[in-house]
Image: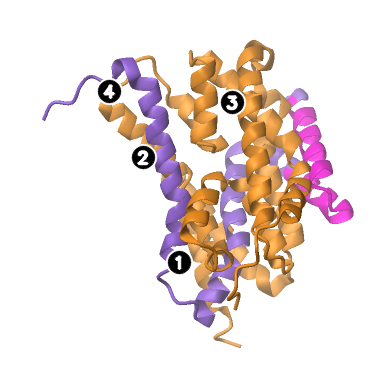
Amino acid sequence: MDNAAVPVSGAGMLLGIRKVSVLIPGIIVFAVAFGAAASAKGMSLIEAMLMSALVYGGVSQLVAMELWRPEWSWGAIIGLAVVTATVNARMILQGASLQPWFAPYSKTLNAWHLFFFTDANWLIGTRYHAEGGRDLGVLIGAGLVLWAVWILFTGLGHLLGALVSDPRAYGIDLVMPIFFAAMIVPLWRGRRAAVPWVVAGIVALVTAKLVDGYAFIIVGSLSGALVGALADDAA
Amino acid sequence: MTLPDPSAWGPILTILAMAIATYLCRISGVVLMGFIPLTPHVRRGLAALPGSIIAATVLPLIERLGLAAAVALLAAVGSMVLRRSELLALLVGMGVIAGLRALGF
């Protein structure tokens, strides 16, 4: 059990920044691609950067660009908020997976740092926590730096605009899947521990075939967690 | 009930609505787990969760993006096994997908 909160240290934040630096080139191309898409959809520079600053969720922002429109009704606004919530619903599970680490810290601190909680620092935090690390500064440092980079390069992408007219050609749609797939290697704990992952993958594949949208992430992940929870009963 | 027309503030209101939806996703899992006791079952379920999230996210995306994406991801994982560098894995993966797409796959 992690009973006492390890103090958030400057050294921890620096460690988080160092750990996240290897992911930054990927985040930069992703941010530039979003900025360019936003400019193509008629968003102003300020609006694009504001979205990156407040939403700070790359995949959901790119999906929003597919649905962006010149005129907004209340229905359309709520509709996009619901789509955003389904795309980002994986964050619910990502947060849950690290909750035992966050629990000893104050509610105020958790409410603040979770604003900067995103795929990349979840990956870093998960790896750090699995290796026994407990300084929340690692997660915070990584999240803050990524946030600044994300906003800055959204702006640059918006200004460059047409230069990255076809982000697919450079494989930008694969940045997030590559980071996720690469994380399997440090998370590997042998075949037995990988059984829930296989179940999660298969259930997600089937769900993706049957249901539109991003429900497959939630259904698949929960199936994997359930298998993991029950796995040792047979042994 | 009459709400004022959102049109002038449409983009800003939409961004705010997206931001609120995303923040709720960020905190709700953590808040929810605060009410669930950490029994051995829950602990094992949480331990299986990160890899499950990754598998459940990536496999359907590969299925949607096609064979070239699958080859690129395998190359990225392979480089990760050999070198343990996320940056190298990214370069390998993007290099492979850009190359395959340039060749028309």
Residue A57 in sight here: yes
Please report, as a chain letter, where disc 4 is located: A
Q: Which chain is purple?
A: B
Per the image, label 4 sits on a secondary structure element best described as loop
Q: Which residue is mark 4?
A: A73
Question: Which image quarter is the C terminus of chain B in?
Answer: top right
Given the image, on which type of amino acid does mark 1 rest? Met
Q: Which residue is mark 3?
A: A34
Q: Horizontal and vertical percent for residue A22? A: 78, 43
Given the image, on which type of amino acid does mark 3 rest? Phe
Q: Are marks 3 and 2 on the same chain?
A: yes
Q: Which chain is orange?
A: A
Q: Horizontal and vertical percent for residue B79? A: 84, 48
In the image, the segment drawn in magenta is B73-101
Q: Which residue is mark 2?
A: A82
Q: Which residue is mark 1?
A: B33
Per the image, label 3 sits on a secondary structure element best described as helix
- Spatial CA distance of label 3 from label 1 is 33 Å
Per the image, label 1 sits on a secondary structure element best described as helix
Q: Main secondary structure of the magenta part?
A: helix
